[in-house]
Structure formats: C-alpha cells, structure tokens
Image (cartoon, rainbow, N blue to C red):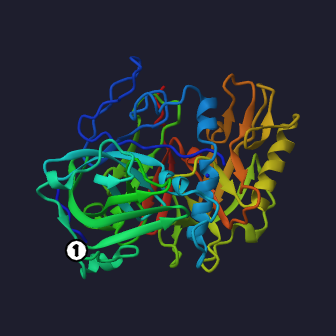
Amino acid sequence: MRGCKMGMRMLPVLLLLLAAGAAASHSSSSSCPATPPDSGATLQVSHAFGPCSPLGPEAASPSWAGFLADQAARDASRLLYLDSLAVRGRAYAPIASGRQLLQTPTYVVRARLGTPAQQLLLAVDTSNDAAWIPCAGCAGCPTSTPFNPAASTSYRPVPCGSPLCAQAPNAACPRNSKACGFSLTYADSSLVAALSQDSLAVANDVVKAYTFGCLQRATGTAAPPQGLLGLGRGPLSFLSQTKDMYEATFSYCLPSFKSLNFSGTLRLGRKGQPQRIKTTPLLANPHRSSLYYVNMTGIRVGRKVVPIPAAALAFDPATGAGTVLDSGTMFTRLVAPAYAAVRDEVRRRVGAPVSSLGGFDTCFSDPAVKWPAVTLLFDGMQVTLPEENVVIHSTYGTTSCLAMAAAPDGVNTVLNVIASMQQQNHRVLFDVPNGRVGFARERCTAA
C-alpha cells in the first residue's frame, strides 16, 4: 500500500463502478460473467444501468428503450448545470431540479472508507470538485448503506479555523461545536455536512486523511443515494488531494450500455498510461477551474468540414464559452449553430426521409442506411468516431438516430459538451501537469 499526504432532457449518465478488492456483480442474471480483479491503481469499470448492473436488478433497465425513457430528463439538466458552472457570476440553473444536479454524476466507484474499512459507492464526476458521503444518522439521506464515523478509529472531524475549513463551500461553525460544517443549497434542496477526514482505500492504494463532507441532513429532492468523488481541479477534489500519489493524472475507457462485464477501466496516476496517444492542450478557465476545456476547431462529416461560425466554438473565459469534456452527459450537446451544421450535413449525406425519435431529430427508418463518419477536430488532434459512437438504434434496430443534440429549447447555453457516448471505447487521458487531454481508440466493451 502507498500512503498519500493531504496535500440533462436526453440521457444521462453512465455509472462507473470500481470493484474494490473482490467486489462481485449483484445482477440476478446467471449469464453475467465474474468481475475481473482490480490491479495496482487500475480499477475495473462497468455500466451501472446495463444488463449486469452491479447496483442490483432494480437498476438495470429492461431494454434500451426503457433506459432511454427512464433517464430522458438528465442530460438536459446536466447541461444546465454545466452551463451554470461555465458562466461567471451565473447562479445555478434555475429550472433544473436539485435531484438532477446532485444525482447526475456519471460514474460510481466502489471504495472503502475508515478503519476498519466500510465499503460504499462514490459517484465520480469529471466536472465537479465536491466530496461528500452520506453518514449514519443523516436525516433525509435515502442510502441504505451510510458511512458510520463512530465505527472508524481513524475518523476525525476538521476543526473550525483550519485552512481546510476555509476551502469548504459556505463553511460555518455550528453553535456548541468545534467542528467545521458546510452547506449546499439548490432550488428546494439543501445539504448540511460536517467537514471530516478518514482513510480512503481505492483498489490497492490508501489515501490517508482524505477530506470529505459527512452528510448530516438533506431536505427537498436532492439527497444523494451515494457519495460523490469529484475529479475536478479544485482544492478539495480527489485529484488535488491525491496529487502526491497520482500526480493529477488519470484516464478511463468507458464500455457501452450493453456490456456484460466490468470491462472498462479507470487508471489513476502516470503508470500504465498510453505512451502513444493523440493529445490536445487543456485550456484553463480561472473562473471555472473544474471544467476540462479543450479547443475544438471544427467538425467534419464525411470529408467535409461543416460551416460552423467561429464564435460557436471559440473559448472565452469571460463568458464561459467553449468546449468541455464531460463524463456526466450521455450525448454530445452542441450550441445551436454547430449542431445545425452537423445535422444538416448528415441529413444531406444520408439522403433518406428524416424522422424523430424521443429527443433525437435526425432519425432514419431504413435499416440499411449508410452513416457518414464524424470527426471532431481539435488543436493538434483529430478524433474520428466510429458509427457506434455516433448512432443509436431503436430496440429492434429498424430506426437509427444521430446521437447528438442541440441545447434544450429556451436554453441559451454557451457550452459544447463532448459526452460519454462519444468517448466510449476510447482511452481518454487527463494529464493536468502537462496541460493536455488525449484520445486513443481502445475496445473495452465486452459482449
């Protein structure tokens, strides 16, 4: 073990599950293969709503159509949330519910907290700095397996007046308490937590004195059923707290919804990262450091670079405009002019009658339709997406749709979001010290 010094109307989110130790799938299906073991700082990844959901049979949708229907509102809410982060001075998006904000985080890891270790689920979010865990006695927290601080000999509350307390959101010292507390509010929802420290184990590593919010009270609709592990770059994020161990570097390969196994991986640290990988510079927005901005310069459909106004792709820290990579949005969302250019060229190239399906407006009922390749153009890097990253199919395969969309009606978003479906079956590298993001094709979906 290594020690560590502290230093949303479309589809949602995949959930990434880390099988810490010998975690096994909880699916009731006897056809689900065994979970591969974790190794070193490499964690196995599975889709939480897939056929072999580790969250149990109640989490697995009965069909792809059911999955789309069940999760239809989350992408739009996620986009509103990201837009609220991106725009300086803007409050949280007023029409997205607290539940959508707090439960949208995309991936879930199995980790162990405390001494002796208590297993729990943590949602991993590349666009968030937060770290909170539902704790025993939390009023309004729906989880059935909260963390029990009283049972851990290594648990410590963070005292008022400490530098860590000053970094917490809305930090306060409750009356008759020397411990640092903090709160989060959103719409009809509020969370109250005690800033705390304990040992966090992920795969074969231990993060000593990991700082998190121990949830004590949740009101409204926002109470998260699991903890949150932020992979943003803020001072209390997992990435910042483990910089001595993992050097602010990680990568993942996300399997598809239909994968039957823990076939994807999350790799923490520099060891085992691809040596040959296409990269683009990571851009810094000083107002919103959590978001991973990149400079997307264009989009090619087939051999044609579609006509997108430069302003629709330009990075502007003052307004928050630009392009971000996000693990918590399912389908890529483009600002209206960019999406219209891609949509129109796809329709022109296919040349078949167009229909709509759910939130998708570019669908074709001919199962023999030939889809053009879509290539995302970045500074120094091009990523050509195979059809499986561009197209979704109806349950019986007779209708296929472009798996991208514009912002929801009435939303004047400034962000282009490269989402998880477009990232699936790629090794996506986040190398913060060297200021770069990379893509390499890697098949990690197991049938």
At which x and y percent is residue 374? 70, 47
Name the secondary structure under disc 1. loop
> Looking at this rendering, what residue extends furthest in the front direction?
176
Q: How crowded is mark 1: few (under 14 residues within 10 Å), some or many (20 or more)?
A: few
> Looking at this rendering, what residue extends furthest in the left direction?
153
Disc tally is: 1
**Residue situated in front as seen by the camera: 225 or 142:** 142
At which x and y percent is residue 228? 39, 55
**Residue situated in front as seen by the camera: 260 or 198:** 198
Q: Is residue 295 visible?
A: no
* Residue 382 relative to residue 265: left or right: right
- Asked which quadrant contains residue 77, the reply is bottom right
Residue in view at x 58 percent, y 34 percent: 67
- Residue that numbered label 1 is attached to: 177
- Asked which quadrant contains residue 395, the reply is top right
* Residue 196 relative to residue 403: left or right: left
* Residue 46 relative to residue 404: left or right: left
Up the image or down, 404 lies above or below 187; here it is above
* Residue 142 relative to residue 157: left or right: right
- Asked which quadrant contains residue 417, the reply is bottom right
Residue in view at x 27 percent, y 80 percent: 163
Up the image or down, 246 lies above or below 368; here it is below
Up the image or down, 328 lies above or below 214; here it is above
At which x and y percent is residue 62? 55, 25
Q: Can residue 437 be seen in this view?
A: yes
Up the image or down, 61 lies above or below 177; here it is above
Residue in view at x 76 percent, y 25 percent: 367
**Residue situated in front as seen by the camera: 358 or 441:** 358
Q: Tag 1: residue type?
A: Ser
